[in-house]
Image: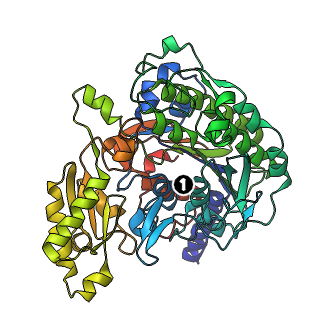
Amino acid sequence: MKKNLTFILFLTIAFSTLSAQKKNNPKLVVGIVVDQMRYDYLIRFSDKYGENGFKKLLKKGYNLENAHYNYIPTYTAVGHSSIFTGTTPTNHGIVGNNWYDTFLHKSIYCIDDNRFETVGSDSKEGQKSPYRLQTTTVTDQLHLAQNMKGKTIGIAIKDRSAVLPAGHTANAAYWFEGGNSGKWITSSFYMNKLPKWVQSFNKNGKANDYLNQSWTTYYDIKTYTESIEDNNPYEGLFKGEKKPIFPHDLSRLRKSNGNYNLLKTVPFGNSITTDFAEAAILGENLGQDEIVDFLTISYSSTDYVGHKYGVDSKEIEDTYIRMDKEIERLLNFLDSKVGKDAYTLFLTADHAAAQTPNYLKKLKVPANYFEDAAFLKFVKKLAFDKFGSDNLIENISNYQIFLNKKTIKELNLNLRSIENYIADEIIAFDNVYKSVTAHSLQNTFYRSGLLSLVQRGYNQKFSGDIIYVPNPSTLGSGYKKTGTSHGTGYSYDTHVPMIFYGFGINNGFTKEYHPIIDIAPTVSNLLQIEFPNGNTGSIIKEVLK
């Protein structure tokens, strides 16, 4: 009898503990992704930051100083997918922003879906869905755990950055349509009509107001000592400008630069993103009850500025000074409307960025540009000279070579022999650093190094037959004169912020290595829900109380 009573007492305590854990959740989770943010921006511009933006997250949250992407390629859609699925392209299937589809024999965009219509506009910019994402997200798992109660909303200037984090079960994902529209739109995948709060926001004139001004530096430009001279040959120009210097007269430039498209490419695109996120919190009553809601916010304009001006520009410095103000504004709003310690927030980036090769070359640092057109000719000639056919190469894109399987079969050639030969020979081409075949990735385990990153980014169904890696600090020929890009597995592309803050989060930091895919299982564990179904990440135990 005594044993039975002890067992019953044990079960009562256990179930009480589980019940307490289930109820002890934040009211709202906010996942922030800053597009193209290098980790060193947190340090390099810290003297210009206030105390209540990035610094508040660092001082009161948990900072992972050595967080990296653990795969190649480091592109926007891939990064957002990996953050929220807790796995890499091998499993989640998003292998690029665009990629060559060997079944359709054409290049496709990651979220295009013509089964759906645009909501909020007459354009086709809303024909999107997350159907190409093969696994669930942490946002999906939260919905499933709560029997589809609670709300999940995704917000970003870029469509892919709104759609993919919000997952398959989202209540909504919204993105900004440029051109002459200047509105936030969505897809009929989510709804048939914009909510009234979105309609009201689209009529408030803020998008227009942001463009009817000049982009000047937030502080005196003479104090921007962390960046190179304003007038330099490494930066791009808006149409209508002769020099890449401040101030940038947006009211004058908007007509020749796609009207509202211009807003996406300047820091005020981040400002209107915060405006819209605040409107969503109010309009959807996020974080107002005991059922957990999830808001994903991607700040996209940082990426546009980085691509045009590069890592070392005064424009990028000013953009992050202003980004710090957006984080401060959002935190203050969350404290006021949701409540201090009532929400959990994480901040990271979808990738980082390389320094401009021409600038590095001036400093005698090894850097270069990859000659894409010349490489295509080189590979086609290799195939023709060895195998006697000029139709063996179907496509070259995203540092991958796709072979024409139909032609290979018709000519009775051996696929592996062609793969191995081309992979071996392309090493002779300038700025090809490494190459590997699909069959090698399928049959060999690469424990470390660049090829291990390639392997985790390789998807047997969607990736190419030969994958090659360019030399360090080498960009595609599309960036041959100015600006920068990303996509590789070098630390300048993989090292990003990873900060947790708020409810259930410890205060501190670590210098230990953590891959980006650890975010989703860590948040899942905090919420006591099942991991995303393709998860390969691990819980970062020291982050959680």
**Residue visible at 37% across and 55% down in the picture:** 73
Return the residue at label 1.
Answer: 523
Q: Residue at x 68, y 32 (%)?
A: 329
Instruction: Tell me the SS state at disc 1.
Output: helix
Quadrant location of residue 529? bottom right
Number of numbered discs visible in the structure rendering:
1
For label 1, the crowd category at 10 Å Cα-Cα, with few meaning under 14, some 14 to 19 and many 20 or more, is: many
Q: How is the image coloured?
A: rainbow
Query: Where is residue 2 drawn, in percent x and y?
Result: 57, 74
Q: Quadrant of residue 352?
A: top left
Q: Position of residue 411 (x, y in %)?
A: 22, 86
Q: Nearer the viewer, residue 362 or 443?
A: 362
Quarter of the image with the N terminus is bottom right
Q: Is residue 468 visible?
A: no
Residue 189's x, y, as percent? 69, 68
- Left or right, 360 with respect to 116, comes to left
Along the line of sight, which residue is nearer the eye, 241 or 354? 241
User: Is the residue 123 above or below the residue 255 in the image?
Assistant: below
Viewer can see residue 79: yes
Judge from the rendering whether residue 502 lies leftward or rightward of residue 342; answer left or right.
left
Q: Residue at x 51, y 22 (%)?
A: 245
- Going by the numbered disc 1, the residue's amino acid type is Val
**What x and y, as percent, mark residue 35?**
51, 44
